[in-house]
Amino acid sequence: MIFPGDIYHHKFQPNLTPVWILVAINVFVYLFTLVGFPDPARNYRPEIYQEKITKLSEMYRQTLDPIELENFEPDNVQAMIRDSRFWVRAQNFPFKGDQVKIEDTKLFLSELRSEYLKSPQYTFGLSPSPTSLWAWFTYQFLHTGFFHLAMNLFFLFLVLNVLQKHVPQPWVYSVYVISGIGGGVAYLYMNQYNEIAVLGASGAICGLMAFLSVVCNIKNIEWSYFLSPLKGYHGIIYLPAYLLFPVYLLSDFTTVLYSNSGVQSSVAHSAHIGGTLVGFAMGLIFIGEQKSKLYFLKKWGHALPPSDFSEFRDKID
């Protein structure tokens, strides 16, 4: 395993830097917001719930075309209740089978939808029918569970510790938010039938990694590797920043090319791609800005007092 940044020697010193501010916001929102799709199993006995899911799966299968059936997973409950087309079709579709059970399953599906529409995930998450413009911002700080939060914060912490050494703080915040918006645009474009709102900072984090890979490109940055706890098999190495793309970001592109997994998968690969593309673009803009400043400094820097010239040059470097 290899991760960008130093996970072994970092001193735990919270302060008002982008890494701690963004981590704190994500943790605060997670602790004070109950998010995620309500667990439908909590209202039923296990055997009754399994029976309803089996019937729901059977009905969902009947609404799919032959190509969709190839990727259908009968036990993937989330895929069935994510698909907005199923919610609509279920009302008037000529299902085959026991009509009493079919009507009972329709009621079960209606209950799932009702619970979802009351949940913070629907209110603050991003879906094809966003509840407000704020959803484009709030979805970036919401998570479906502790593991989802922990994984995102792990990478956010590592990447920002490296990135904030190379770019001004306003750029860090801008890349996070704008990459998150870009991830949302890509998700909605590629997942038009996924009714369940997307949550998480992963699109923004992919944007930050792409931004770092462009800004630092061939510069060596810290990478932490771990093969085993034995001495000599874990530690820090220095490798070019551009390796972030093949190691972490390329897999999302290949996954979406192979299969549009918006409905079938719980991982929003399309949001990762959108965030990545925005991060790359903002990295190019940042480099262009720095080169422009350097050009004007060389052309007209002689007109500045020596102290101002040195200070301005150091900021660009």
Image (cartoon, helix red, strand yellow):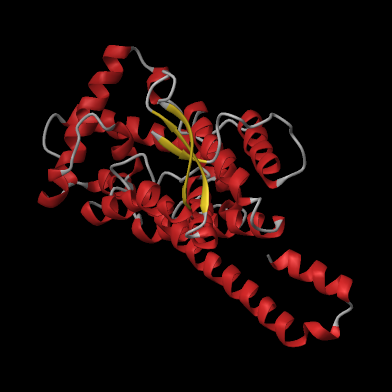
Q: Position of residue 107 (x, y in %)?
A: 33, 32
Q: Residue at x 66, y 54 (%)?
A: 173
Q: Position of residue 46 (x, y in %)?
A: 31, 13
Lateral position of residue 51 relative to residue 22, left or right: left
Q: Is residue 118 visible?
A: no
In the rendered image, the vertical position of residue 86 relative to residue 302, given as above or below? above
Image quadrant in which you'd find residue 303: bottom right
Q: Residue at x 39, y 51 (%)?
A: 249
Q: Is residue 93 visible?
A: yes
Q: Residue at x 35, y 42 (%)?
A: 82
- Camera-nearest residue between 167 and 189: 167
Lateral position of residue 25 relative to residue 147, left or right: right
- Camera-nearest residue between 30 and 19: 19
Quadrant holding the N terminus: top left
In the rendered image, the vertical position of residue 88 relative to residue 223, given as above or below? below
Image quadrant in which you'd find residue 29: top right
Lateral position of residue 140 relative to residue 246, left or right: right
Q: Position of residue 182 (x, y in %)?
A: 49, 60
In the rendered image, the vertical position of residue 211 relative to residue 300, given as above or below? above
- Camera-nearest residue between 125 and 85: 125
Q: Position of residue 191 (x, y in %)?
A: 35, 54
Lateral position of residue 57 relative to residue 97, left or right: right
Q: Residue at x 34, y 58 (%)?
A: 190
